[in-house]
Image (tube, helix red, strand yellow):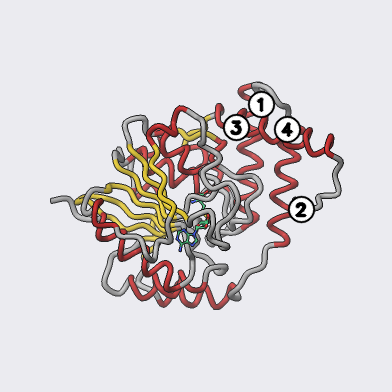
């Protein structure tokens, strides 16, 4: 156990509070339109940590003021936001922002607004719980958009590279009651695997529609899913070779008219940026404005 400097009692209280916040936030839904409105009002085009945090701070506040807050209170939310700020301040970028912007500009990845890509997505609503308050992602709106798009496109067969605790996996299943969700992560005995793979959905009713694969994606054979997946989320190994492997397998699994979404097109993932920049020479890729999401849409047959 890592030394957190907390007594057992404090740790238990913290865990309980975190569970409470998580339950509260999974019950509060917010429309994609409201998230876009907040983003629109924010100055600047590049996805920035500040814009994500500010947008979400406002969303949390607005939601609380409107709904009165079922369980928990505003102090919980403030505490979560402080946690986000602390984590994000300490996040290290592994590529200078300027170099990232140069590569971005030189690539053939076209920038597009979420509304241009998904006209009508405004009406889709997403549970706030899909945002991991403890994450060090550049942008806090990515997951609501990933989930909103899965709903908007009416995904029935969803595949995720990189389960981690399974928060996004859970919301894929919860937001798309008709869908089957397959999620892949490293086997638990692999030293690179994180702790608690799939723990977020384990034991919940939504888990019945989730199929978990525990295998290194590099050795995993996608043949049984050939041309069957209509929504694929690539969020596993972010190295050049890792993303290349997952992308080739995603294209093999992609059904006509299907969608692939890559996460973390950002300075912190140089291998991923380099691979997608190359891949964009032969494939139409779109970066959703003010996010770290890149999207490919296959032609329908
Ligand atoms: C960024 S996390 C995934 C986050 C998750 N998609 C979410 O939205 O909460 C990346 C995950 O990819 C997994 N991963 C890394 N390399 C992998 C590989 N070669 N095969 C399968 N999974 C891998 C890691 O174990 C980690 O859990």
- Residue that mark 1 sits on: 65
Distance between mark 1 and mark 4 Cα atoms: 20 Å
Residue 269 marker = none
Q: Nearer the viewer, residue 81 or 32?
A: 81
Which structural element holds mark 3? helix
Which sits earlier in the primary sequence, circle 2 or circle 3?
Answer: 2
Closer to the observer: label 4 or label 2? 2
- The number of callouts visible is 4
Say whether marks 3 and 1 touch (CB < 8 Å). no
Q: Is residue 293 visible?
A: no
Say whether marks 2 and 3 touch (CB < 8 Å). no
Which sits earlier in the primary sequence, circle 1 or circle 4?
Answer: 4
Rendered position, 30 above or below 258? above
Residue positioned 37% across, 45% down in the render: 182
- Residue 252 in the image, given as x and y percentages of width and height: 25, 60
Residue 17 marker = 4
- Residue that mark 2 sits on: 2
Which structural element holds mark 4? helix
- Residue 65 in the image, given as x and y percentages of width and height: 66, 26
Which sits earlier in the primary sequence, circle 3 or circle 4?
Answer: 4
Closer to the observer: label 2 or label 3? 2
């Amino acid at each position: 156990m890592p030394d957190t400097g907390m007594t057992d009692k404090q740790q238990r209280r913290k865990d309980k509070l975190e569970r409470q916040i998580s339950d509260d936030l999974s019950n509060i839904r917010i429309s994609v339109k409201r998230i876009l409105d907040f983003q629109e009002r924010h100055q600047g085009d590049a996805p920035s940590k500040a814009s994500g945090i500010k947008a979400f701070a406002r969303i949390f506040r607005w939601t609380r003021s409107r709904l009165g807050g079922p369980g928990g209170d505003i102090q919980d939310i403030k505490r979560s936001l402080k946690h986000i700020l602390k984590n994000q301040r300490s996040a290290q970028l592994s590529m200078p922002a300027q170099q990232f912007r140069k590569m971005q500009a030189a690539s053939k990845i076209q920038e597009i607004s979420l509304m241009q890509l998904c006209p009508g997505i405004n009406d889709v609503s997403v549970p706030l719980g899909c945002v991991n308050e403890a994450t060090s992602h550049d942008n806090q709106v990515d997951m609501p958009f990933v989930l909103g798009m899965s709903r908007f496109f009416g995904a029935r067969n969803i595949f995720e590279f990189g389960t981690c605790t399974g928060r996004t996996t859970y919301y894929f299943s919860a937001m798309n009651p008709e869908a089957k969700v397959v999620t892949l992560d490293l086997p638990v005995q692999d030293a690179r695997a994180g702790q608690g793979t799939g723990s977020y959905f384990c034991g919940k009713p939504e888990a019945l529609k989730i199929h978990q694969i525990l295998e290194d994606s590099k050795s995993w054979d996608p043949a049984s899913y050939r041309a069957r997946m209509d929504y694929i989320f690539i969020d596993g190994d972010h190295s050049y070779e890792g993303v290349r492997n997952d992308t080739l397998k995603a294209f093999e699994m992609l059904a006509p008219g299907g969608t692939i979404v890559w996460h973390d097109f950002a300075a912190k993932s140089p291998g991923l940026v380099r691979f997608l920049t190359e891949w964009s020479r032969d494939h139409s890729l779109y970066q959703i404005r003010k996010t770290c999401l890149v999207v490919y849409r296959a032609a329908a047959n």
